DNA sequence: CCATTTGACCATCTTTGACTATTATAATAC
DNA sequence: GTATTATAATAGTCAAAGATGGTCAAATGG
C-alpha cells in the first residue's frame, strides 16, 4: 500500500499543478484521507519544507486555512539555501550587509528594500542588553531573506 | 467561504471609498449580513483600530450611528514620531501588523515592503528562547520604520 | 531503528447572546 | 408649559461557544 503520506503529497502536488500556490482546509483534507489532521502537518513538514522549496502559511479559527507556496526560482534555485546556510544560527552585521548588497546587485531587491534589510540587521536594531546578538540577528535576517524570495515568487505569478 | 468578518470589512471599505468617513447603523448592517450586532464591533475592533488608521465615533439611542473616520495624517515626520511613540520599547505582533497595513493602505510602502516589515516583526523571527520578545520586536521594528520614512524622503528628492 | 500515524491537549480567530449603557421621544404630573 | 418619568431605539461589553489549525509524544509498522 502506498504510504498515506505519499498519497497526500501527490494529492497536494496535483492541486498545485499549474499554479504556484494552493489553499486547503486541514480538517477537510484529513477527512478526505480518513486520517488524523496532524497527519497533514507531518506531510507538510517532511515534503513541503523550505528545503523542498515550499513555504507554508496558515491561519486558525473560523475560515482558517493552510496555504502552500512553491518557490521555484528559475536561475537562482538553491540560492536561498546557500544564504540560509551561510547565516546559520548566528551571523554578524557585516555578513548581512554583504548579502544584502549582493541581492541588490542581482536586482533581486530594490534599493528601498535593501535599506530595510540593513535596518533589520544593523547594530542599532539590536542595541539591547542581551548577549548573543548575532544569534538574534540571524533569526530575524533569516526570516527577511525567506520573505524576499517569497516576494519574488509572488511577483512572478501575478500582482496583488 | 469568505469569512463574515472579511466581507463586512470589505463592505465598509467600499462604502468609504472616495471619502474619509462613513456613518452606519450597527443593527442595519448586522441585519444585512444576518449576524449578531456585536459582530460589527468585532470587525471594527480588529480591522478599523487606531493602529489601522481609523477612528470610531458613535452614538446610542434613537438616531444612533457608528461613524468610521479615516485618520488624517500629520506631516510624514510627525507621523513617524507618532508611530515610534506608539511602539515605545515594547510592542506586540498584532500592533506591528496593524501599523504595517496602515502604511500599505496609505501607499507609503509597497506590498513587498509590507511583507518585509511583517517578517521582521513576526513571531517566527523571534522564535528564540529569550524573554521580553516584545522589547526585542520593538527595537527591530522601530529601526525599520525609521528606514521606511527615510526611504520616502529620498524618493521625494531623486529616484534611484 | 526509522518513518509514519494517531490522539490528547493547546492556540487562535470568529460568532453569538445575554446583559448593560445611552439617547430620543412619548406620556404623565405639576 | 415645564419637569419628570416611562418607553423605545440604539450602541457597547464581555464571556462563552464554535471553528479551525499546531504541537508533541506515544503507538505502530516495515
Image: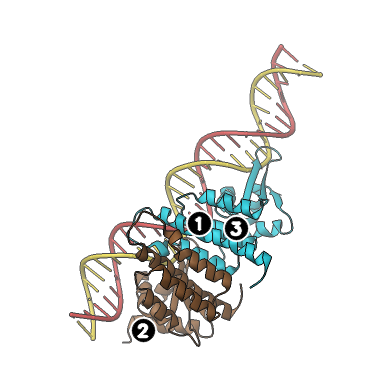
Chain colours: A brown, B cyan, C red, D yellow
Distance between the alpha carbons at the discs numbered 2 and 1: 45 Å
In the displayed structure, B24 sits above or below C14; it is above
Residue B160, quarter of picture: bottom right
What x and y, as percent, mark residue A61?
46, 60
Q: Dot 1: few (<14), some (14–19), or many (≥20) neighbours within 10 Å?
A: many
x 41%, y 78%: residue: A83
Left or right position of A23 against A47: right
x 55%, y 77%: residue: A154
SS assignment at label 3: helix
Toward the viewer: A75 or A150?
Answer: A75
Image quarter (top left, top right, bottom left or bottom right) of the C terminus of chain A: bottom right
Image quarter (top left, top right, bottom left or bottom right) of the N terminus of chain A: bottom left
Quick check: marks 2 and 3 in contact, CB under 8 Å? Answer: no
Q: Which residue is mark 1?
A: B142
Quick check: marks 2 and 1 in contact, CB under 8 Å? Answer: no
Left or right position of B90 against A39: right
Q: Dot 2: few (<14), some (14–19), or many (≥20) neighbours within 10 Å?
A: few
SS assignment at label 2: helix
Residues marked 2 and 1, same chain: no
In the displayed structure, D13 sits above or below B54; it is above
Q: Which residue is mark 2?
A: A6
Q: Which residue is mark 3?
A: B102
Q: Mark 2 or mark 1, which is nearer to you?
A: 1
Residue B52, quarter of picture: bottom right
In the displayed structure, A28 sits above or below B54; it is below
What x and y, as percent, mark residue A157?
57, 80
Amino acid at each position: 500500500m502506498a504510504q498515506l503520506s505519499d498519497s497526500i503529497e501527490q494529492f497536494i502536488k496535483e492541486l498545485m499543478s499549474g499554479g504556484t500556490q494552493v489553499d486547503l482546509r486541514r480538517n477537510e483534507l484529513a477527512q478526505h484521507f480518513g486520517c488524523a489532521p496532524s497527519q497533514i502537518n507531518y506531510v507538510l513538514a517532511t515534503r513541503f519544507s523550505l528545503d523542498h522549496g515550499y513555504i507554508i502559511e496558515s491561519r486558525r479559527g473560523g475560515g482558517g486555512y493552510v496555504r502552500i507556496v512553491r518557490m521555484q526560482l528559475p536561475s537562482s534555485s538553491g540560492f536561498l539555501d546557500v544564504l540560509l546556510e551561510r547565516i546559520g544560527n548566528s551571523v554578524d552585521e557585516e555578513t548581512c550587509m554583504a548579502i544584502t548588497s549582493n541581492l541588490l546587485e542581482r536586482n533581486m531587491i530594490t534599493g528601498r528594500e535593501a535599506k530595510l534589510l540593513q535596518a533589520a540587521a544593523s547594530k542599532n536594531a539590536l542595541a539591547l542588553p542581551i548577549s548573543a546578538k548575532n544569534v538574534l540577528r540571524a533569526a530575524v535576517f533569516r526570516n527577511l531573506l525567506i520573505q524576499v524570495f517569497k516576494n519574488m515568487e509572488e511577483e512572478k505569478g501575478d500582482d496583488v
